[in-house]
Image (cartoon, rainbow, N blue to C red):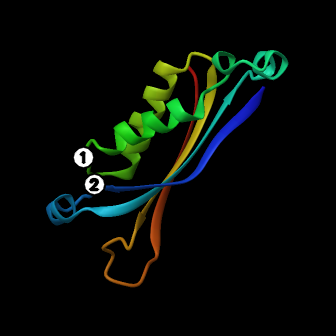
C-alpha cells in the first residue's frame, strides 16, 4: 500500500451557505490523500499502475466547479468520484478550506476534513 497526495490545491469557486457567497465567490484550498496498492507501479515504473495525480487533480477541479452550500457536500462528492474513477483506491482523506469565511470575526480559513474507506 502507499499514499498519493496533492497538497495546497487552490481554486476560486462559488460555494457557501449564504446566497451572497454563491454570487461573489471565494478562494478555497484542497488537500487530498488517497491510499492504494502502489507496488506494481513501483516495480514496473508504469503510470497506468498508479493513481495518476494529474487525473486526481482533474477530479477535484471538476467537483470544485459545481456550486454547493457546504464544504462537507463538496468533500463527499469528491470522495465518491475518486472511488468511481480509481478502482485501486481503498481510502480517501480530503480537507477543504474556505478563506476568510463569513463568521463575523477574524478567521483566516475554515476547514472541513472527511475520511472514507471504500465500502
Image coords of residue 21 (percent x, y): 22, 63
Q: Secondary structure at mark 2?
A: loop
Question: Of all residues shown, which one is farthest toward the bottom?
Answer: 105
Q: Please identify the quarter of the rendering in which residue 12 is found.
A: bottom left
On screen, residue 102 above or below 79: below
Task: Tell whether label 2 touches label 1 (CB within 8 Å).
Answer: yes
Give percent across and percent down for residue 24.
19, 65
Q: Tell me which corner region of the image, top left, top right, bottom left or bottom right, holds residue 27.
A: bottom left
Left or right of residue 76, residue 42 in this image: right
For the N terminus, the image quarter is top right
In percent of the image, x 37 and y 84: which residue is there?
Answer: 105
Q: Check the image and report above or below for 48 versus 28.
A: above
Circle nearer the N terminus (1, 2): 2
At horizontal 62% and vertical 23% (from top left) the residue drawn is 89
Residue 3 sits in quarter = top right
Residue 34 placement, left or right of 29: right
x and y, in percent, of residue 102 in the image: 30, 73
Location of mark 2 (residue): 15
Residue at image coords 40%, 47%: 72
Give the label on residue 67, or none: 1
In the drawing, does residue 10 fall left or right of residue 36? left
Seen at 29% across and 44% down, the residue is 65
- Label 1 and label 2: CA atoms lie apart by 5 Å
Amino acid at each position: 500500500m502507499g499514499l498519493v497526495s496533492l497538497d495546497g490545491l487552490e481554486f476560486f469557486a462559488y460555494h457557501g451557505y449564504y446566497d451572497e457567497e454563491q454570487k461573489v465567490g471565494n478562494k478555497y484550498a484542497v488537500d487530498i490523500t488517497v491510499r492504494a496498492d502502489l507496488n506494481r507501479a513501483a516495480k514496473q515504473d508504469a503510470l497506468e499502475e498508479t493513481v495518476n495525480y494529474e487525473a486526481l487533480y482533474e477530479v477535484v477541479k471538476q467537483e470544485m466547479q459545481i456550486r454547493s452550500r457546504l464544504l462537507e457536500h463538496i468533500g463527499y462528492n469528491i470522495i465518491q468520484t475518486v472511488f468511481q474513477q480509481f478502482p485501486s483506491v481503498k481510502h480517501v482523506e480530503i480537507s477543504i478550506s474556505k478563506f476568510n469565511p463569513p463568521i463575523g470575526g477574524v478567521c483566516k480559513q475554515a476547514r472541513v476534513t472527511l475520511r472514507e474507506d471504500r465500502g
